[in-house]
Image: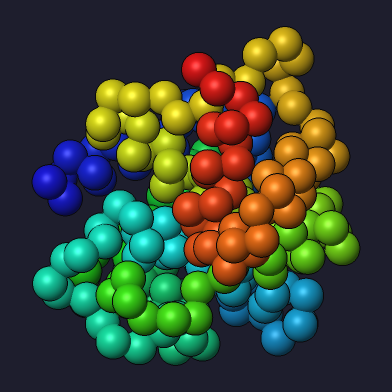
Amino acid sequence: MKAVIYSLMAFLCLFSIRPAFAAHVPPSAIITACASDEPAEKADCDAFLRGSLERLQVYALKGRIHCRATPFDVGDIKDLLQYASSHPMADDGEAGALTFNYWIDSSERIPCDTVPGYWTMGHLVALCSSDNSGTSPCKSYTTALLLVVNVEEVANKVTYFCPKGAAVRSDEEVLNYIKTWTTADPGRADQAAALGYIDALKAAYPC
């Protein structure tokens, strides 16, 4: 199974399945951000790594036996930098492929789905409402999340959502849908962002 996933990620490095939502992020950008001492850079690094991790944690690998009992922390950033130095990737590839491969290289790197600490929809909506620009933690998280979801779609031969009309949906349009979906049910604010964000897109852009 891991070999299949690696092959899918190699494909996704070259071709973007969802350009309307997931922007290209070169591996060097995330490596630089993760190695930086600047608070803004470190926040983007943290968000990107979480985005690629949390879908695996709460959905794709939910219920697995081999997982860790501790949440994501700064030690993961250090380990990712070491992994990147021994697994170099050209900038025509995706940073999401680098982080995804880092997480699945050992399933024990991924927290069990019962471990708290993942971002909620309430937290994500607050971040995105404050700043959803291309260099924000909001954009870093959702971009990494969508790249993992791309793998799910290819692996399972499904399409979760189908934006129609304009080739590229504006960030404001997507944010408005996400906010509306989250506030429509009080319980959704506490849902894992890695689940709720995709559920909101499914509702906004049904196939």
Identify the residue at horizontal 42%, vertical 24% (top origin).
159
Q: Position of residue 129 (x, y in %)?
A: 84, 58
Say if residue 189 shows up in the picture.
yes
**Residue 15 or 127: which is nearer the viewer?**
127
**Residue 68 or 95: which is nearer the viewer?**
68
Q: Quadrant of residue 171?
A: top right
**Residue 205 or 172: which is nearer the viewer?**
205
Identify the residue at horizontal 26%, vertical 61% (top origin).
62
Tell me which colouring the rendered structure shows: rainbow
* Outermost residue, top side: 165
* 190 shown above or below 141: below
Identify the residue at horizontal 36%, vertical 39% (top origin).
151
Q: Position of residue 30 (x, y in %)?
A: 59, 63
**Residue 124 or 14: which is nearer the viewer?**
124
Say if residue 171 shows up in the picture.
no
Identify the residue at horizontal 26%, vertical 31% (top origin).
156
* 69 shown above or below 109: below
Q: Quadrant of residue 140?
A: bottom right
Q: Quadrant of residue 19?
A: top right
Task: Give the left or right position of residue 45, taking residue 3 as reference.
Answer: right
Q: Position of residue 81 (x, y in %)?
A: 46, 75
Q: Position of residue 132 (x, y in %)?
A: 81, 53
Numbered circles on residues, count:
0
